[in-house]
């Protein structure tokens, strides 16, 4: 959006119109990746990113930044589901780390979009905050401690511990 445009997008209000499953914060058994709160929040982030891009013809026309922004947002959610499917604590932790890195990439892409006047400061803050919410300690990192406490033994000896 250019500085002279008065049509401001409120991504957060638009996203609230979507029907997206939210997970209660009480303890529950997680049987599938869709049960993970971080995955649900990542899904909201993706929709916010797509809505922001759709609101600006200039952003849509900047193929490199558009594709990098959507790719990073999709990667956030994909890495959560892929890590969950790995059935390995260490792999799950690794993929959650990739997801957090992709959150930072989304935030960075939207700084570029702001500097190019494709979005306004409000949209940047909404997307930045949602990416932060996905990657914060309560949404993603809370898995790290309990998972590390119960390592899965490797089928293969490590060359670093004298076993191979």
Image: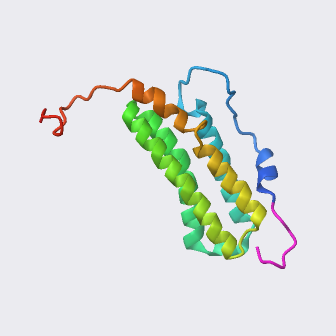
Camera-nearest residue between 18 and 75: 75
**5 within the magenta span:** yes
Residue at x-position 56% and y-position 65%: 67
Q: Position of residue 115 (x, y in %)?
A: 67, 74
Q: Quadrant of residue 122?
A: bottom right
Q: Position of residue 47 (x, y in %)?
A: 68, 52
Camera-nearest residue between 75 and 146: 146
Horizontally, residue 84 falls left or right of residue 161, namely right
**47 within the magenta span:** no
Q: Position of residue 151 (x, y in %)?
A: 35, 26
Magenta stretch bounds: 1-9
- Relative to 66, residue 77 above or below: above
Q: Quadrant of residue 55?
A: bottom right
Camera-nearest residue between 160 and 20: 160
Residue at x-position 68% and y-position 46%: 44
Q: Position of residue 120 (x, y in %)?
A: 76, 68
Q: Residue furthest right?
A: 6
The C terminus lies in quadrant: top left
The N terminus lies in quadrant: bottom right
Query: Colour mode?
Result: rainbow
Magenta stretch: dominant secondary structure:
loop
């Amino acid at each position: 959006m250019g500085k002279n445009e008065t049509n401001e997008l409120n991504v957060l209000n638009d996203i609230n119109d979507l029907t997206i499953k939210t997970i209660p914060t009480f303890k529950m058994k997680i049987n599938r990746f869709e049960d993970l709160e971080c995955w649900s929040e990542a899904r909201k982030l993706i929709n916010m990113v797509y809505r922001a891009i759709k609101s600006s013809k200039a952003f849509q026309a900047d193929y490199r930044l558009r594709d990098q922004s959507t790719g990073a947002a999709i990667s956030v959610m994909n890495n959560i589901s892929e890590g969950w499917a790995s059935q390995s604590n260490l792999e799950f932790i690794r993929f959650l780390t990739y997801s957090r890195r992709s959150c930072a990439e989304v935030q960075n892409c939207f700084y570029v979009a702001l500097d190019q006047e494709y979005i306004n400061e409000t949209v940047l803050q909404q997307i930045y905050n949602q990416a932060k919410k996905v990657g914060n300690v309560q949404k993603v990192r809370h898995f790290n401690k309990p998972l590390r406490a119960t390592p899965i033994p490797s089928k293969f000896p490590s060359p670093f511990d004298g076993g191979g």
